[in-house]
Amino acid sequence: MPADQRPLAIFLMGPTASGKTALACELSDRFPLDLVSVDSALVYRGMDIGTAKPDAAMLARYPHALIDIRDPGQPYSAADFRADVLPVMQQISAQDRVPLLVGGTGLYFRALQQGLSDLPEADPAIREQLSKEAEQLGWPAMHARLAQVDPTAASRIGCNDAQRVQRALEVIELTGRPLSELQRGGSDALFPWRVLKLALLPAERHLLHERIAQRFDAMLAVGFLDEVRTLRARGDLHAELPAIRAVGYRQAWEHLDGDSTPGEFRDRGIFATRQLAKRQITWLRSDVGARLFDPDRPDLLARAADAVQLFLGASGESAHNIAPAA
């Protein structure tokens, strides 16, 4: 069998607040890696605090492709991500470097590697009907309906994620088939890169929960609510946009609408972030090809670097002598 001549790529995945960005930067100091963000919220400009976006100093030292590429008023999809990331990866590979894709949006990773199914176009009439039903019953009840007909999709979608619940129910109405079944279709074409998958999976869930709470409090301390006030002041954004539906932003928007006290807002934001982490962990556990690392182990960097070194075929000495990304 001929040797696999495809260029190399690395996926660094993990739940929110697991330390993916820090590890990615440390690995890029050791190996010829260029960083690419895989995050559905980091694509938006002006959404910095609530997304835990790397600050300007970090981005200057460790540039990330696909950060700040959209206005919050513009929806961004898995299809958009795939269209954007493939030429970025090609350019990196052409420069004899290795793309390191880092983030927690599992749908984007899956869309990139497996392709996208041929899903039906949106149907305004069905969407309007589903919206009317949701006004009467609430989105948690609509999510419960989805769980009866497509439990796989429901397990990946939050009970208050109106946009995705609506889309999953709409697909069933249009095709008679579950969204999760159609999404498994994808593409049979061989992915153009050989991929090493690294996944940060905390062994002690309570430690992740503590970090999530600490990070949310830190966001509040540096002006997260002021950031959302600035977004609201534009006048053209609303609560149903994908950007504003991002975890933390939805709860902040509702709080500024008067739907919660400061304490309730904090609790809801932390709870929603923990629920996101739970879904991300469930997705990671289903990826049998990923190498799992506990982010709370003190030897995380050494173990991850060993895996990358073996994948790249570099000796220990040469790996440490490679200049970091410019």
Image (cartoon, grey):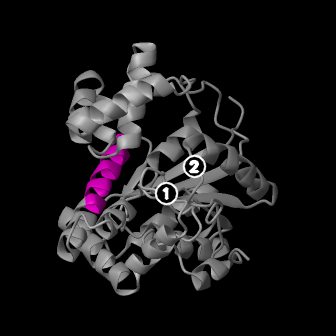
Seen from the viewer's position, the closer of residues 186 and 242 is 242
Contact check, label 1 and label 2, Cβ < 8 Å: yes
Query: How many numbered badges does the structure rendering display?
Result: 2
Q: Is residue 268 magenta?
A: no
Seen from the viewer's position, the closer of residues 177 and 98 is 177
Picture coordinates of residue 54, whole percent (x, y): 53, 76
**Location of residue 111 (image quadrant):** top right
**Quick check: 256 left or right of 42?**
left
* Looking at the image, residue 46 lies above or below residue 273: below
Inspect the image, locate mark 1, and give the three-letter code of the amino acid beneath it.
Ala
* Looking at the image, residue 128 lies above or below residue 15: above
Quadrant the N terminus occupies: top right
Residues shaded magenta:
272-287
Quadrant the C terminus occupies: bottom right
Q: Secondary structure at mark 1?
A: loop
Q: Which mark is residue 76?
A: 2
Q: Which mark is residue 243?
A: 1
Residue at image position (24%, 69%) is 265
Structural distance between the alpha carbons of marks 1 and 2: 8 Å
